[in-house]
Amino acid sequence: MSAAVRPVRVGVCVFPGINTDHDTAHAVSTFEGAEPVWLWHKDKSVGNVDAIIIPGGFSYGDYLRCGAIARFSPIMAAIADFAADGGLVMGICNGFQILTEAHLLPGALIRNIGLKFVCRYVDLRVENAGTPFTHTAEPGDVLRVVVKHNEGNYRVDPDTLAAMRDNGQVVLRYCAPDGTEAGKATGGTIGGSSPNGSLDDIAGVCNADFNVFGLMPHPENSVEAGLAGGTDGRVFFRSLLESVRDRVVAS
Amino acid sequence: MSATERRATLEAAVKLGLTPDEYAHICTIQGGEPTYVELAIYSVMWSEHCSYKHSRPVLGRFPTTGPRILQGPGENAGIIDVGDGWAVAMKVESHNHPSAVEPFQGAATGVGGIVRDIFTMGARPCVALDSLRFGEIDGPENARQRFLFDGVVGGIGFYGNCLGIPTVGGEVYFEDTYAGNCLVNAMSAGLLRADQIVRAFAEGPGNHVVLIGSKTGRDGIGGASVLASQQFDETLEEKRPSVQVGDPFTEKKLIEACLELLHRGLVVSMQDLGAAGLTSSSSEMASKGHVGLDIQADHVPLREADMEPWEIMISESQERMLSIVDPARLADVSEVCERWDLDCTVIGEVTDSTMLRIYWHGERVADIPARRLADESPVIRTPSFKPDHLVDEPLVVSDAVYPAPADTGAALLELLAAPNIASKRCAYEQYDYIVQANTVQIPGSDAAVLRIKGTSRGIAFVNDCNGRHCYLDPYRGAKAAVAEAARNLSCAGALPVAVTDCLNFGNPEKGDIYWTFEQAVEGMSQACEALDTPVVSGNVSFYNESFGKAIYPTPMVGMLGVIDDVSKHCDARFKKEGDLVALLGPAGNAFLDGSEYQKVHFGRVEGRVPDVDLTLEKELQRVLREGIGAGLVKSAHDCAEGGLAVALAECCIASGVEGGALTAAAPPSLGGALTLPDGALRPDVALFGEGPTRVIVTCAPADAAALAALAGAVPLTPLGTVGGERLQITAAGDTLVDVSVTELRRSYESLPDRLA
């Protein structure tokens, strides 16, 4: 039986207050050979998924601090184990915040410099096209995706930032439509490329092992032609799915 | 003091907002002095806000039926068939007074309330829109208005964003008349299968009455009677405790849990707790189902342990739902609620008595015929008279009072920067307008457009009302609001199908206010009849006054449109160099009366706004939709505030915006070289005057003849071509406007500077 390759199972983790769970599952299902699998915050196991996405929203109402309560959910211990075994985990927006709170990604996301929620199209430059989440893009590609968040202002200590830059862990930066201006923001001003005052214009980062990825923009709302979001978000899902397809074939 | 000790005297009744006549009526119904709990219940249920006592006799005028209408007024939301087995539930509601007192929470809970009305019907909420009005925003004396704007916009975003419901549209106006009484009208709509409608009536004696969601506290006590049904005076600050506090996180869980309960058929029916809380929800469910309910008030989970039964019954604590559950299903219902970490408590039972009975630790503290509360509250029709300020004739534009501007281009920039015209980007960029992955047209265009997943269909939404026009002529202004809403939908290529309305007026006990209300309803009704857009739901907000001065009459129209093939939707953007620009509709329909130009440039508000020709309007909209559907019309934009020139400028500005992004290196903007048609109008009036039934369209040169043929009897006046990076308008050889699109955009995007 050669053709009976089973679909790639992408776990979509639902915490109470998450609100792009359906969008994320829908985005996965727009790819042939991929199927979303619900993971529930009270679960103690991630089951037999091939990759995991923690979607965006407002887990636990963002009470206390974004992601601070979700990280203590039973499922997070299972996700940490999954990542420790090399499993691919992508966190979008609140998912990114949860992953930093869980220390699966470096840094923290604080209040936008403008002190307001911001929903806006941004241009993203792919700084590292060698990760499992971006390998179907070209280095320097500029992607237009929507951000929508209150706390997307990425912060990390200088030593870690230097190491991240050296390693290529800074995967996405906010940039101008022509790809320029990335990396110029000092975190002190709003405007320019960054919608939130993010340090070094950082929009997405990986861990040192490149199997955990977090980004503030919402690629799941940019996967279908004919909608306002466009299709530039597909590259992240395509990369993720292709990265785990080998594993599926092997199983 | 316990419930039994508190006396229900006339004095107590007046303090709760009842009149002596109403108190006497209550004593007759109850056969003597009521209990205090009964009095409190009557006071909220017979308040203007809950009983519609002044508006009911007039609202019967609205057309409410049609082949697409599955549910008209009288339920939590109206429901419209949009094809392929799908239906849309929609409704708008005011949260004016809470927002004036506490803008952030007032607006947030306004969103929360309207969203509950939608999912109560079994629909998943898929859009939110907000129609907002504040006072003028310039200068130190208007600091409070900027504070209100900031708070209201922040509150809407806080709640709607958290729920994951895209806020896709709305409107914002700034007029002095709203300074003491801002307007916050929150609209929502949801999608459901047409055969899965849930209606909110109790049935089945012996069934449980189950309260789901948040615990009950003292917040919002008297929200309906004290806050919503009285005008503002110096006691504004004291009313702060009557404002509810919102918890969108709980509401998000409620949405998921309740939709699961409804779709799995685990509950008999459901009703949200809004104004007047447990009292209104229980009496309405009982009255509609012709049954009674026995409520054990001491079973209600409380936030504050020492609450009295009357407080529990009228508390407006948010994020609560009442449902009727067959005892055999209770375990399943509890399981779902537990999974979402929501309280789920049996607080009573359906009876065959038709009475609403409240018990407190076994003692009966209220016993009222449910229909008396919900359906048989008093009706009041105020003797009405025409207000003094209305005139019969339109202005004669005199050069002495209205000198033509020396620099027409500068006047255009002044108008583009006017807060009522300028881009509201600073508001809508605080709203998640793209979540749920259905948004086709984001805010900033004539209408919001969404697709229905799994189909080729689209649905479109607008909010429209020009309060100043309604002030000058409530009949014509309200009629024009309906026509404009339908026109905006048609500009997007959508067929207008139904209306939800939010009628914001002053004190209905005043004859002139009541007259404007009657006139507005008449104007709206005629337009709704002519344009085949029945009213399916709505809300009346009276007492929008501060210190005795009423707001402009503001009958806000929310409208739904449908597009069979959403890929054929249209927007305002000039698309291509060389395309022809034309005005569809009568070129002479431009008046100074009530225009933004009159207000901004001349500082006056006077005259009489024109009447909409509904026959021509309907024909124009048909031409638009067919032209868009056939691919002849490449862009369409309504001429509204600021008239023809502002509409043209907006088409140019929008052309440089791709994917909604506004960045320094936006694609080259398209301008246009245009010539005004010869006419009797003074050029500035032709450019900036306002009038209905006019739309800027563009088409490819090769399609010009086909479009003209399609237009038929609807005037189609060629204006020029798209091209270059400047907007140039000439008339009779004179250059009136020659401004770069960059400059136009700078003025149009300047609202944040004025709000800073």
Image (tube, rainbow, N blue to C red):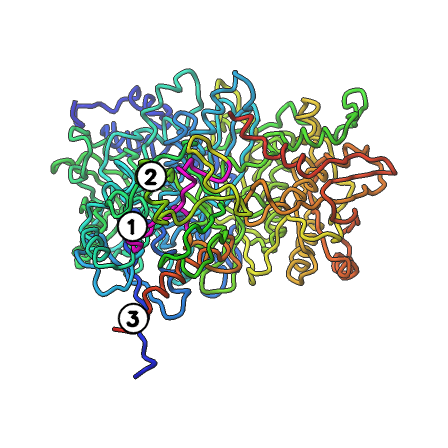
C-alpha distance separating marks 2 and 3: 34 Å
Q: Nearer the viewer, mark 1 or mark 3?
A: 1
Q: Residue furthest left?
A: B362
The mark nearer the N terminus, 1 or 3, is 1
Residue A248 has which mark?
A: 3
Q: Quadrant of residue B315?
A: top left
Residue A208 has which mark?
A: 1
The mark nearer the N terminus, 2 or 3, is 2
What residue is shown at x 39% (from left), y 56% (from top)?
A23
Q: Are marks 2 and 3 on the same chain?
A: yes
Q: Residue furthest right?
A: B733
Residue nearer the viewer, B438 or B475: B438
B676 is higher (above) or lower (below) than B133: below
Q: Chain of mark 2?
A: A
The mark nearer the N terminus, 2 or 1, is 2
Q: Which residues are magenta?
A: A192-218
Q: Quadrant of residue B471?
A: top right
Q: Is residue B527 left or right of residue B688?
A: left
C-alpha distance separating marks 1 and 3: 24 Å
Q: Secondary structure at mark 2?
A: strand
Q: Is residue A84 left or right of residue B114?
A: left
Residue B303 position in % (x across, y down) = 20, 33
Q: Quadrant of residue B641?
A: top right
Q: Secondary structure at mark 1?
A: loop
Q: Amino acid at mark 3?
A: Val
Kindly identify which residue carries mark 2.
Answer: A109
Residue B264 position in % (x across, y down) = 28, 61
Mark 1 Cα-neighbour bin, 10 Å: few <14, some 14–19, many ≥20? some
What residue is shown at x 56% (from left), y 41% (from top)?
B663
